[in-house]
Amino acid sequence: MNIPETGVPRIVVIGGGFAGISFIKKLQKQKVQIVLFDRHNYHTFQPLLYQVSTAGLEPDSIAYPLRKIFRKNTDFHFRMAEVESINTENNTISTSIGSLRYDYLVIATGTRTNFFGNKSIAENSMPMKTVPQALNIRSLILQNIEKADITADERERKSLLNFVIAGAGPTGVELAGALAEFRKGILENDYPELDEDEMQVHLIEGQNRVLPPMSETVSKKAQKFLQDLGVQLHLETFISDYDGKIVTTKDGKKFETATFIWAAGVTGAPIKGIDGEALVERANRYKVDGFNKIKGFENIYALGDIALMETTEFPKGHPQVAQPAIQQGKNLGKNFRKMLKGDKMEPFKYFDKGTMATVGRNKAVVDIGKMHFGGAIAWFLWMFVHLWFLVGFRNRVVTFFNWTYSYINYDRAARLIIRPFKKS
């Protein structure tokens, strides 16, 4: 791996998401060697993946090189590789490019798409957890609209212009809203031969309301926003199958569609080698104590979505969103600094800064403490928060100008089929 031997503690971090980068940033001037592993050489701002998939932003607006983030760290090493297993007895990890010893191991692998064991859905639907997956969705959406523009077969055109999304959490709601706005702003201008009403957006949710993790107040507002945009909601509906052409629900509904996007759930992404009592299998998350140390191990920690920290306020662990990951990363980084000095570490305490989701232009909803509101103010707040947390000044500027351009012109400039998508 070409990692130099060192006389200082070697901290191996697996995962360059919110938790991993927040942790490493806190150790910038410490006398430690940090080795970061990730499958990609960039950090992905996952809350805006849906904008890449719906042609609102280019991928380089929400991705940032990991090496560039840590330029100021003097003993930092990044390796692009897949971590395959952990040997806890020998304090080593095995990766796709070799093995490496660690003194401390920090696992921040996040989540992967949860298909709940349904093989047909896993094989035929479109997940959206990574930049390549978002680009696949963008290409498929645009390709299907292009095909619909030239087909004379009415049934085929209907299938090509029928977009079905599973899961009405923040990702599903934001996707549905963005597709509905695409229909209103782009279809009539770029595809005059197509009738706007032919493009249908269906959002399917198993629970009795959209945005189940948020308050009922904002859930009702979001539902009205979606309906105003023409999104067809199917609540208390469970999907049983998708064969690549037809989505079938448990109550017998059928949707003919060439574009089925799965946003109905995630599960943890554990690594082989740590199991037993340390791994909660139903959630695929590592059970950690108040200091994010995996139970049963003295030098292995877990952060963010992969960590399950049971507290009075969160008996099932913290929500698998960005804020707990960022805060846990920062707290563990501070605790490592204390530990290296021989000081007492401080347990993690989550500060809930609220939850928000956007549905479309001037349409967003926000839960902050006892405040629950939606509309234009919530939308501008959503934009400010997301710009603030983007990594890199350039990304903030480019994203701001893209959003400003889209707001003024009702346009989505990134509707390019750069890499055509082909279903296997």
Image (spheres, rainbow, N blue to C red):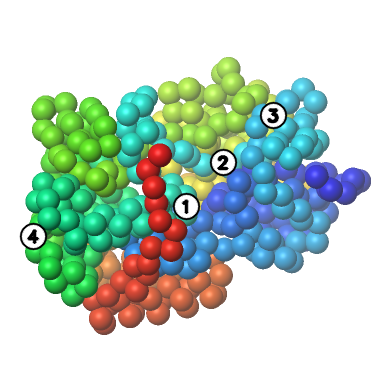
Residue 386: image x %, image y %? 41, 65
Residue 179 visible, this orientation: no
- What type is the residue that disc 4 sits on? Asp
Residue at the spot 52% in from the left edge and 35% down from the top edge:
269
- What type is the residue that disc 3 sits on? Ile
Q: Mark 3 and mark 1: span between their CA atoms?
A: 27 Å
Between marks 3 and 4 in the image, the one whose residue lies nearer the viewer: 4
Mark found first going from the N terminus, 1 or 2:
2
| In the foreground, 386 or 315 | 386
- 290 sits to left or right of 322: right
Mark found first going from the N terminus, 3 or 4:
3
Residue at the spot 77% in from the left edge and 22% down from the top edge:
89
Mark found first going from the N terminus, 4 or 2:
2
Identify the residue under disc 2.
109
| In the foreground, 331 or 181 | 181
Identify the residue under disc 1.
132
Residue at the spot 65% in from the left edge and 24% down from the top edge:
273
Residue 356: image x %, image y %? 31, 57
| Mark 1 neighbour density, 10 Å: few (under 14) some (14–19) many (20 or more) | some
| Mark 4 neighbour density, 10 Å: few (under 14) some (14–19) many (20 or more) | few
Identify the residue under disc 4.
197
Residue at the spot 33% in from the left edge and 79% down from the top edge:
404
SS at badge 3: strand
Mark found first going from the N terminus, 3 or 1:
3
